[in-house]
Amino acid sequence: MNIIDQIITRYQENFGQMPDHIARAPGRVNLLGEHVDYNDGFVLPAAIDRATYVAFSPTDAPHSTLVAADFNQQTFFSAESISSKTQADASPLPEWGLYPAGVMWSLMQENLSVPSINAVFASDVPRGSGLSSSASVEMAFMIAWQTLGGWALPPMQLALLSQKAENKYVGVNCGIMDQFASACGAANKLLLLDCRSLEWKAVPLPENVSIVIADTTVRRKLTSGEYNKHRAACEEAVRLLQQNLPNIKSLRDVSVEEFNRLADQLPAEIEKRARHVVEEIGRSNQAEALLEAGDIQSFGRLMNECHASLRDLYEVSCPELNVMAGIAQSIEGCYGARLTGAGFGGCTVNLVAKERVDGFSKILAKSYESKTGLHPEIYITSVSNGAELLK
Ligand code: ADP
Ligand code: MG
């Protein structure tokens, strides 16, 4: 049964009627610009054809009832109970409930109407693997409440309110990229986002290439401590570089040339972290021109350089990601391969000539398995629309 039929069936079992609406919000993959969103840099994500789907209707009940079909669990909360992060009976919210409850909280902060709903949701975005299942859950509920609340906001605004939910309610200090890509995605388009101004444009994905996502199946979460340490290193680099460059506000403002001139003034570890960011912003600055010129070879090289930089300078890779990217880079027809997402496990993203995709996927899976003993998941991905109401 496909995922939409599954949630409709579950909805009928749970609530005794058909749902009025179905919404869908995709996960995302980032092609270039990794760990630069919180340094005011540029990122190049795309919405993927894996998504969270929610079946929902309004209810007269004073609380919302949500079923997470993938966990076979249910929660219920009201406008009153969410301010204390509890269910309507004052018991704690399940961890997954924080995401939709956070969305409701974030909308209430804006004085937007968030009526009670009955909902069943399920997703084929793998969890915790760098494809942003959390943003897809948030955006699916954003669409649900927008549909029933009688208001409408631009997708970027929905993304910002989702990010606020994740930062302030769930307590994960993520940048804007995940929610942005899930909200603003467009079929066959890469999204080039300036994380400082939030200006963005859609750049066509060249027709003769496919995006292949390869899941190492290793989940070593980048702990929030680790993530915060990396963020702090970037901030410390800015503070030290300001002695010579008083006008910089973030590493975005430092050119590669300036950085090379001043790098020896930084402690070794800070220098490595900052060098990744400065050079990665330099790489993502070239992306648009290369894609528009159809120069996939050069664009792919930037992806390979990005992987090496995440491995050696930013140090957020792991052996399995290095094996996966290394194999891919050696296969004919692969333009570029790198870890995607925060790192320490999860997926690689590969840009592959369309006519080679099947062979590529088979060789990659086989070699990875023989080198690691792990059975990888390979997704040949198409680039999809952003969050939307299907019915
Ligand atoms: P990711 O990189 O996939 O976004 P996160 O750790 O940010 O990983 O978010 C994963 C969390 O999002 C899960 O632990 C769960 O709380 C929530 N989530 C994701 N997908 C689902 C789902 N299908 N059903 C319920 N909750 C989900
Ligand atoms: Mg997430």
Image (cartoon, rainbow, N blue to C red):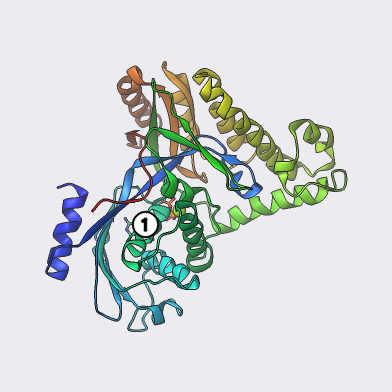
In this rendering, the answer to whether 50 lies above or below 32 is below
Q: In the picture, residue 158 is in which quadrant? A: bottom left
Q: Is residue 269 visible?
A: no
**Residue 190 to residue 6: above or below:** above
Residue at image location 48% in from the left, 49% down from the top: 180
Ligand 1 closer than 8 Å to label 1 CB: yes
Image quadrant assignment for residue 365: top left
Rendered view: 376 above or below 98 = above
**Front one among 147 and 314:** 147
x%, y% of residue 126? 35, 47
Residue drawn at the location 26% of the way across and 51% of the way down? 390
Q: Tag 1: residue type?
A: Val
* Location of mark 1 (residue): 137
**Ligand 1 - quadrant of the structure image:** bottom left
User: Which residue is found at the position 35% from the left and 37% from the top?
Assistant: 374
Q: Residue 391: image x %, image y %? A: 23, 53
- Choose between 241 and 221: the one closer to the eye: 241
In the structure shown, which secondary structural element does the residue marked by tag 1 occupy?
helix
Q: Give the residue at x 46% y 59%.
A: 162
Q: Is residue 389 in view?
A: yes
Picture coordinates of residue 334 (x, y %)? 44, 21
- In the image, 296 versus 367, the foreground residue is 296
- Mark 1, residues whose alpha carbon is within 10 Å: few (<14), some, or many (≥20)? many
Compared across the picture, whether 99 is left or right of 268 comes to left
Query: Residue 217 location in percent, x, y?
Result: 38, 42
Total count of labels: 1
Up-down: is 328 above or below 78? above
